[in-house]
Amino acid sequence: MKIAVLGTGMVGRAVADRLSTLGHDVAIGTRGVEQTLARTEPDWLGNVPFAQWQQTHPAMPLVSFADAGAHGEVVVNATQGAASLAAIEATGAANLAGKVLLDAALPLDISEGMPPLLSVVNTDSLGEQIQRAFPEARVVKSLNTMLADVMVDPGRIPGHHNVFVAGEDAEAKETVKSLLREIGWPDDAILDLGGIRGTRATEMYSALLFSVSAALGTYDFNVAIVRK
Amino acid sequence: MKIAVLGTGMVGRAVADRLSTLGHDVAIGTRGVEQTLARTEPDWLGNVPFAQWQQTHPAMPLVSFADAGAHGEVVVNATQGAASLAAIEATGAANLAGKVLLDAALPLDISEGMPPLLSVVNTDSLGEQIQRAFPEARVVKSLNTMLADVMVDPGRIPGHHNVFVAGEDAEAKETVKSLLREIGWPDDAILDLGGIRGTRATEMYSALLFSVSAALGTYDFNVAIVRK
């Protein structure tokens, strides 16, 4: 499948690499290709510059958001939440029309340090904002409740734990669930929270994600819903 | 131990009954004793009127918030979040000075129906509001991430799942952890999220709690943090 991954950070790299390894035709989208490749410093999370990462992951072209949008049959939003609406705008509403937009972003506000606040919360969510702004895209939120390493390698966490999906379009959710299964998520680990409003729940969960990570001293965990 | 439970709803009844059964000297506090006993209709959640419940749970006196505050060495806030600050005010700051205040409430706003919104979120929390308003109380938030039946009977959910604690006072948290162990929570299920700001995380998690409950059609589940 032709897949566009928007974003060159930790999440974008992890998802793009995994989907490419699985045999998908992945292009990575960025705001400015030359600027992204010109960076020589690690990012704020300590990730190596993209050009350095690309040397060991040469299969995927780095292209503009618009070219990524033209390429992908499925588009993955792996940009920072604060940049997501602009990135998707640059990707192009026409490029997104009718396509599955897998939104993996969190609307984090780190202006007051860690743990982050959310820039949209409670009465709205980034997932809802994206769906409203791009009504012809079939937005499915998923993967936004865990570390990138866990997103693409669920087996690194032992036993039962969950990934959530939420969105209005049932067929689009099936496409995303199918990709999740390819990545390694067991079918019974995929918990469908219903419509796009469910994105509030998984975005707001991030407060617990960051709080637990501070308590445990690691992000290498995931959440499980355990039933009676 | 002398324990006051503020609130006569589902959570108050469950916690009071469990702690009383364990041998604690429990008083249940309410705004108006006569009004509470005079109710003949089920509450909005379908719980039987308190007077009817009391017939099968006669060991515990129903008293005013102030009398409950005078009684308890530990005070449990099991009121609705919207009523919590007023209930604790009526309990009396002097009654609470130096005491452990186990806050189990959620600041739910159901004015727009279900799922609830939060009346305080993201940059503040009910737990923080209570600690600020009653600086001499030693507030520990816990139990607010699950159905009342699970709070007091963790064994009804199989395997590993968690209860969280957050608060500024380490000794107060030890008192709460000790009560949680008495109730049946394994020591390794009790996850300490640090200071009072951690209450934002568990209150905001409630969005996922309600979303998952709608998806599963039950509240009979709990959350587990699963480590690598």
Image (cartoon, coloured by chain):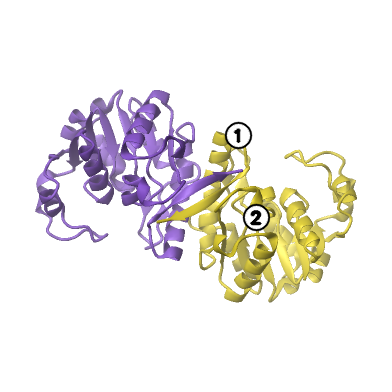
Chain colours: A yellow, B purple
Residue A168 position in % (x across, y down) = 56, 71
Disc 1 residue crowd, few under 14, some 14–19, many 20+, Cα 10 Å: few
Residue A190 appears anywhere in the view:
no
Determine whether B16 is above or below B219 in the image: above
Q: Point out the tag, 2 or 1, that comes first from the N-terminus.
A: 2
Disc 2 residue crowd, few under 14, some 14–19, many 20+, Cα 10 Å: many
Q: Quadrant of the N terminus of chain B?
A: top left
Determine whether B52 is above or below B28 in the image: below
The residue depicted at 84 percent of the width and 38 percent of the height is: A41
- Residue B2 versus residue B168: which sits nearer the camera? B2
Judging by the rendered image, the residue that carries numbered circle 2 is: A105
The residue depicted at 49 percent of the width and 35 percent of the height is: B193
Label 1: chain letter: A
- Residue B49 versus residue A224: which sits nearer the camera? A224
Residue B122 position in % (x across, y down) = 50, 45
Q: Is B100 left or right of A195, judged from the image as shown?
A: left
- Disc 2 secondary structure class: loop
Where on the picture, by quarter, is residue B32?
top left
The residue depicted at 80 percent of the width and 56 percent of the height is: A31
Where on the picture, by quarter, is residue B78?
top left
Q: Is B30 left or right of B110, judged from the image as shown?
A: left
Amino acid of disc 1:
Gly
Q: Is B49 left or right of B174, judged from the image as shown?
A: left
- Residue B137 versus residue B140: which sits nearer the camera? B140
Residue B35 position in % (x across, y down) = 12, 49
- Residue A144 versus residue A121: which sits nearer the camera? A144
Q: Is B8 left or right of A195, judged from the image as shown?
A: left
Residue A38 appears anywhere in the view:
yes
Q: CA distance from mark 2 to mark 1?
A: 22 Å
Judging by the rendered image, the residue that carries numbered circle 1 is: A217
Q: Quadrant of the C terminus of chain B?
A: top right
